[in-house]
Amino acid sequence: MTRPVKLLILQLSSIGDVVLTSPVVRCLKRQLSQVELHFCTRQSYQAIIDYNPYLTGHHYYDGNLYALIQELRAEQFDYIIDLQNTFLTSLIKVAVGCRSFSVEKQTFRQWLYVRWKINAMTEQHIVDRYMATVLPLGVENDGRGLNYFIPYKDEVEIDWLPETHQHDFVAYAIGGQSPTCRLPVLRMIELCLKINYPIVLLGDKNDRKIGDQIVKAIGERQIYNACGHYNLNQSASLIQRARVVFSHDTGLMHIAAAFRKKVYSIWGSTTPQFGYYPYKTPHVRLETLGLPCRPCTTASSGTCPMKHFKCMNNLSFDFEVKELRIKKNF
């Protein structure tokens, strides 16, 4: 009997980047015969891939590179699919020592866009760049979008929520990698008042304090602060239940896209032109156009280099959430 081809996918970057690899995983498994798929990511992202039915093996980087390399070499992979293409993943590829395919980074185009505001970026979502990486293996994009798999134990029951939020709610992912990809607190409050609907705030324990400020300003009848109360898969379960999702440029935005939710994506120091906007789902981009200083970074930065933060402070909320046909007053 012929041994299955063993492939290793590398993506250690972030929650969103791991979620965005899901079409590659699915297409590899469905389009190649006798293939054994393994995935390597950081230990902190284990919940994202542990329940993916298309994967056979899971490998986690916890800071010990030597141990990880020894573990991967023992698997005797035939190919590595590097969907991050960084110095760290290059070290892993060299050490494992098999044929590899690596995603195109577009580093120079990104530098032109950030440094000189010359937008030479290709009109291509990062998922399509990921899929181009496996094209030499005869694998093509099936156009079915992202996947996210929630185990039964992490499905949030509706009666876990306050009674005011058990019938319907909007999810708002208030987190982000840095302050420049998040609205200031006062503007978050303004946005929540604009939505005028029961809202579940999502984020980790670091976002809890901001969520409490929003609740204090608006009230518990409209705002439920779930930040830090639920793990990642449970937060994904709440997104799956939401009518629509508001999100900064963060991993929960891509999880919302995996559930085909309509996403109102909020952009500050970064722009959708980098290719990380919600994939294969209806979405509205909320951004301040025409600023000569934007984008100021490829991912996120700690503070506004111009000190005015106009990308978020001047962001217009002149839009209508048509999905909320019946307004609820509080």
Image: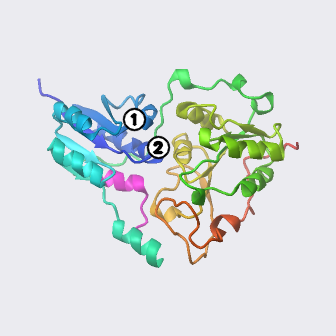
Q: Nearer the viewer, residue 280 or 72?
A: 72
Whether residue 111 is visible here, answered yes or no, is: yes
Residue drawn at x 60%, y 35% as measured from the top left: 240
Q: Which quadrant would residue 249 be assigned to in this image?
A: bottom right
Q: Is residue 169 magenta?
A: no
Q: Residue flagged by tag 2: what amino acid is it?
A: Ile
Q: Which quadrant would residue 103 be assigned to in this image?
A: bottom left
Q: Nearer the viewer, residue 54 or 229?
A: 229
Residue drawn at x 83%, y 37% as measured from the top left: 221
Of the numbered discs 2 and 1, the one sitting upstream in the chain is 2
Q: Nearer the viewer, residue 273 or 68?
A: 68
- Place of residue 96 in the rendered image (x, y in percent of width and height, measured from the top left): 17, 41
Compared with 283, 64 (above or below) is above
Query: Which residue does the numbered mark 1 point to in the structure image?
Result: 43
Cα separation, mark 2 vs mark 1, equals: 11 Å
- Place of residue 114 in the rendered image (x, y in percent of width and height, measured from the top left): 46, 71
Q: What is the basis of the colouring in this image?
A: rainbow
Query: Which residue does the numbered mark 2 point to in the structure image?
Result: 15
| Screen quadrant of the N terminus | top left
| Screen quadrant of the C terminus | top right
Look at the numbered disc 1 and give the secondary structure of its residue: helix
Which portion, as a residue range, is magenta?
A: 119-133
Compared with 180, 142 (above or below) is above
